[in-house]
Image (cartoon, rainbow, N blue to C red):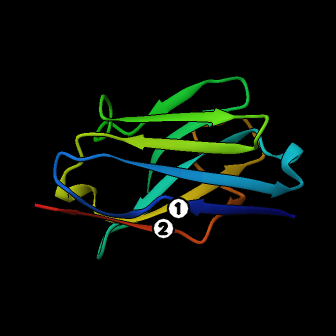
């Protein structure tokens, strides 16, 4: 099994920054793609960013130029640096992992989620 544990969420003013972390443990060799989803109240969960074990990166159009995803393979950790945050970025952010190389369309593993709230 794989465990994904997020940290780093919180409350920030519009224009501010946050960094989310996701530490993976367990059968981590089975994960080839990791990344982040988010779900705002009343909306569907959507993929925010993904990164493969080979370093291929994808972003949702809504966060391009503001968010940066990275991974530290030695620490089995994925990060999401969020700059220029907007109130519409408010959501629960979920770390996710998938066994295949992909853009994280169908994750096999999920974290418990961390709340990000951006005040105007």
Q: Position of residue 114 (x, y in %)?
A: 48, 67
Q: Nearer the viewer, residue 56 or 26?
A: 26
How many labels sit on residues? 2
What residue lies at 76% left-to-right and 41% top-to-bottom? 75
Mark 1 touches mark 2? (CB < 8 Å): no
Residue 105 pos. (x, y %): 57, 48
Residue 116 at what x, y percent from top left? 36, 63
Secondary element at image label 1: strand
Where does label 1 land, which residue?
A: 94
Binning the other alpha carbons within 10 Å of mark 1 as few (below 14), some (14 to 19) or many (20 upward) gives: many
Residue occupying image coordinates x 18% and y 58%: 87
Which residue ends up furthest to the bottom in the rendered image? 42
Residue 41's place in the image compared with 56, above or below, is: below
Residue 32 screen position, x and y as percent: 76, 38
Q: Is residue 31 above or below residue 113?
A: above
Q: Hey, which quadrant is residue 6 in on the image?
A: bottom right
Residue depicted at 87% across the width and 64% down the height = 1
Q: Is residue 100 left or right of residue 65?
A: right
65 shown above or below 46: above
Q: In this rendering, which labeled residue sits more in front, label 1 or label 2?
A: 2
**Which quadrant holds the C terminus?**
bottom left
Q: Dot 2 lies on which element? A: strand
Q: Residue at x 31, y 46 (%)?
A: 17
As rendered, which of 8 and 54 lies closer to the eye? Answer: 8
In-image side of 106 versus 100 (left or right): left
**Quarter-of-image position of residue 104:** top right
**85 relative to 68, above or below:** below
Residue located beneath label 2 in the image: 114
Tell me the tag on residue 44: none
> Considering depth in this image, is 42 or 8 the residue closer to the camera?
8
Q: Earlier in the sequence, mark 1 or mark 2?
A: 1
Label 2 crowd bin: few (<14), some (14–19), many (20+), radius 10 Å: many
């Amino acid at each position: 099994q794989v465990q994904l544990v997020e940290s780093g969420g919180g409350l920030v003013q519009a224009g501010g920054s946050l960094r989310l972390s996701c530490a993976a443990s367990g059968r981590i060799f089975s994960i080839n793609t990791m990344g982040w989803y988010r779900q705002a109240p009343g909306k569907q969960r959507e993929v925010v960013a993904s990164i493969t074990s080979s370093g291929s990166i994808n972003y949702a159009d809504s966060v391009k130029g503001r968010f940066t995803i990275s991974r530290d393979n030695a620490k089995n950790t994925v990060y999401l640096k969020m700059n220029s945050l907007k109130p519409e970025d408010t959501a629960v952010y979920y770390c996710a992992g998938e066994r295949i190389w992909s853009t994280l369309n169908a994750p096999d593993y999920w974290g418990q989620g961390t709340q990000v709230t951006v005040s105007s």
